[in-house]
Structure formats: structure tokens, C-alpha cells
Amino acid sequence: MSIFENSEIWFVTGSQHLYGPETLKQVDKDSAAIVDGFNNSGKIPVNLVFKPVVKTPNEILDICVQASSDKKCLGVITWMHTFSPAKMWIAGLKALRKPYMHLHTQFNRDLPWREIDMDYMNLHQSAHGGREFGFINARMRKNRKVVVGHWQDEKVQEQVGIWCRTAVGWADSQGLKVARFGDNMREVAVTEGDKVEAQIKFGWQISAYGIGDLVAYIEKVSDAEVDALYREYEHLYAVAGNCQPGGEYHENVRVQARYEIALKRFLEDGGFKAFTTNFENLTGLDQLPGLASQRLMAAGYGFGAEGDWKQAALLRIVKTMSEGLPGGSSFMEDYTYHLDPANEAVLGAHMLEICPSIAAGKPRLEVHPLGIGGKDAPARLIFESATGNALNATLIDLGNRFRIVVNTLDVIEPLDKMPKLPVASAFWNPHPNLTDGAAAWIYAGGTHHSAYTLALIPEYMETFAEYADVEFVVIDKDTKIPQFKKELRWNDIYYMLANGLK
């Protein structure tokens, strides 16, 4: 079942009794037409639900309370068709616990120059009604999304669709459960973080489990189940000859199939949507879960290597927001550089765990030694990422706040073959270039792990950060290092003042 099914966004229009019943009937009619237009546009992934115009403080409070308590409602779109005195909205906005977007539009696109009269002017007051609503939001320091333009414009519809997807991502974030198998990799700083604060800010529940808890599930997987899953592998992937039945490494593949079945059952039984592993915590396992982790990511689970629960949760949310969009998403690591001045680029990869949703072609299933960790050679999927516009997003804990860092990328074809590198990979030019992009990422404290996606643009992550009231910085084609460093310093001051007593 799609995560967008059985979910709603409410469309709430503000006005007042001053305009009389006939005008208010027209406001309702126009609002319903906008909702129908959005729902039929093909740009909005969630069903928008028309709500009758609100005209008094009590009506506004009631609809905001209802939206906050309705489990199907993921957020609210507000529109001021006429002038809605903003003091009427104070109680409602204080009570609203769902994300909301301010649509600053007008029902008619063009002025009826020859026919315009005061009746028209009294009905079409969005130009100043929206400013009144904007003031009270600014006065109350409310984080919200503002979308401006005519509602039939495709760009406006696309922006509304982006906001709706981030609202779905935010809803998925609430109560998101992350299973940590083992702890964080020893002595690594960036994978640490305040799990209590993460639950307060994002709604995440991060729980640790011993490897023995997973082993107990592995021991219950039957050979028949492994056989069936292996047949699925043969259908989906180009399985190396030595990994097929009778081959030297066939049993290594079966071990990963057993891990996949057990991991999925563990996650389903516990209601987990993301998980982490750590090659330093493998007691009881013959291999590091490689193929198993790749396959679970492709099924929609978030993943973080080396105990990195922040990236596991962030990847899950990225996958939630991008469901149904072209381009995949994966756990990723900036692994090594190509520093040719004529074509500087980054080779992104990991030991095993890159999601096949980003693959340009049919992945190959192979078994190779890991090289570290002292365990058996694990099976993994090997492929190259599809090319195009992409981004890396990461979440860091700065002690007094979380920061989301995004870098936009141009993913390009590798310059040559890599026959001796048995991992999935992506090759990209970071914006604005490798030198400044890497420097800005490092100045911002960005991690070596990220959620890599070919499906989203920075606007998704920026809006999500605003829902959570956490810092957001973007490194893109316009980034200049001196200005970026100033932005980081200004943010330090802002969050020190804004969160000093929280």
C-alpha cells in the first residue's frame, strides 16, 4: 500500500461575515474549485479535502483542533480569498499541531478590466488578505511554507505537491522507529548524537538491540524460504556463475538471503522503518549484512552503516517523500576523489550497502571478501548509479542543535571502467565545484555519510527542517565560501539566542 493512501491535506479558506451570505457562498464555491483543480492536476500526491470557509475565531479554532487530532489529516493549506482579520486566527494557530502552508493565490488569474467593479474587488482580496494572515504568522514566529502564484499555474501546483510530500515525510517521521543492531562504530564522532533530542525534534524512537536478538530470528528462517528468495534474486539480478547453485559462493548468497528474511521480520514485528548495522558488532553472524541491507533499502527501509542512526532515519524520510517520483535514493558515502583539474569529481560508494533503486542498469550479484572485519565474504549487488541532478543530505548534532546540510550534485558517467572494485558506486561533480563544495561541507560539519537521492530537490529538505525547527544550510551552484562561512556564524548566533532557554 502506498504511504499516500488514506492520507489527507485539508484546504481551509478564511473570510468573515462582513461580506454577506452571497459573497461567502462564492468563496466556498471558488475554494472547492481550487481543490478539485489541484486534485485533478496530477501534481499533488495526497488527496486535498475541501473544508467550508471559516469566518469566526471559534470556527478557525475548531477546524485547527480537528486537523490536529485527525490521524488522516497530515497538514493544512490556508487561503485568504477575502480579508480575514488575523486576530481571529491566533487561537487556531496556537492549537494547530500539523504542518501548514499559506497559499497566496487569487481565484481569477486576470483582471476583468472592462467589468471590474466593487463587487469584484470585495470578493478578490487575496492581495491584502494574504498579507494580513502573513503578519500574524510572522508575529507568532510560526514556521510555515508560503507559495505564491495562480493556482492553475503548473509551477504553483508543483510547489504545492512538494509541500504535500514533505508533510507526508513529516508524518512518517513522527514515531519513526529505528533499530540499532549493535552500537555506533567505536571512536567515530559523527555517528553519535542526542537520541532524546532527536525524539523531541523529529519524533524518532531509536532503540538498540544485541546481535543475538537478530540471530534468534535468523535461526528460525527455513531453507525453503531461502530457496524462494534466491529464485527472486536470479530473476532480478545478473547472478555470477560462482554464486549460483553448485558454485563456490552459493552458500554465501544463501546466508544473505537468510539475513534478509530475518531482518525484515524483526523490523516488521517491531514496527521499525529504519535500521543500522556495524561491522564491529557482528558476534554470531558469519557475514556483514550487505545484500540484505541493500534489498531492504530498496523496499523502503532507511539504513545507516556503522551505527549511524541519524542517516538511517533521514534516508527513510527521503524515501517516503520521494515515493512514486523518478530516481532512487540510497545511503551513501563520499569515498574517494578524482582530482584531475580538468574534471574533478567524487566517487561515492560504501563497502556494501548502496541501494539498487539508484542503479542505471541491472545489478550484478557477486561475492567478494570484505577486506576488513575478519568475517566471511558477503554477497552484494554491484552497479553504477543513474546520472542526472541529485543531492546529498546529512544530519549532524552540534550539541545545542541539529543541522541539516544539503549539497546539490551533477551525477555523471564514470570516466572509465572499474573492474577490480566490487561495490556499487556513484560518480558526481558537487556544486559549485569539488574544491568549494567539499570546503563548505567541511565548514558546516557535514558527515561522511549522507542520504543520496536522484528524486528530490533541496526545497523538500528545507521545508522538512522548518517543520522540525532545525537549522538548514544548502551548498549549491551559487555558494561562495566567504558568504557561506558568514551564514554559519550568523546561524550560531541565531540558534544561541532562539534556543538558549529551551
Image: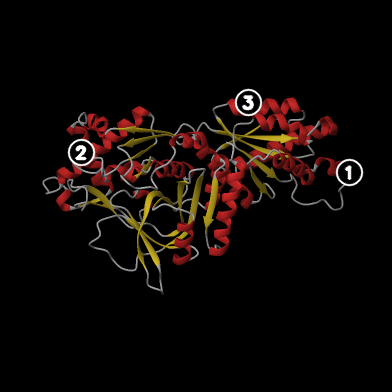
Inspect the image, locate mark 3, and give the three-letter code of the amino acid beneath it.
Gln
Residue drawn at 64 percent across, 26 percent down: 65
Q: Which residue is mark 1?
A: 118
The local crowd at label 3, few if under 14, some if 14 to 19, many if 20 or more residues have their Cα within 10 Å, is: some
**Alpha carbon separation for disc pair 2 and 1:** 77 Å
Quadrant of res 315: top left
Residue 159 coordinates in the image, percent (x, y): 60, 48
Q: Earlier in the sequence, mark 2 or mark 1?
A: 1
Of residues 357 and 428, the one nearer the viewer is 428
Q: Which residue is under mark 2? A: 285
Q: Amino acid at mark 1?
A: Met
Q: Residues within 10 Å of mark 2 (few under 14, many from 20)?
A: some
Quadrant of the rendering where the C terminus is positioned:
top right
Where 169 sits versus 485, above or below?
above
Q: CA distance from mark 3 to mark 1?
A: 35 Å
* Among the two numbered marks 3 and 1 on one chain, the one whose residue lies closer to the N terminus: 3
The x, y position of residue 388, in whole percent, is 44, 60
- Going by the numbered disc 2, the residue's amino acid type is Leu
Residue denoted by label 3: 66
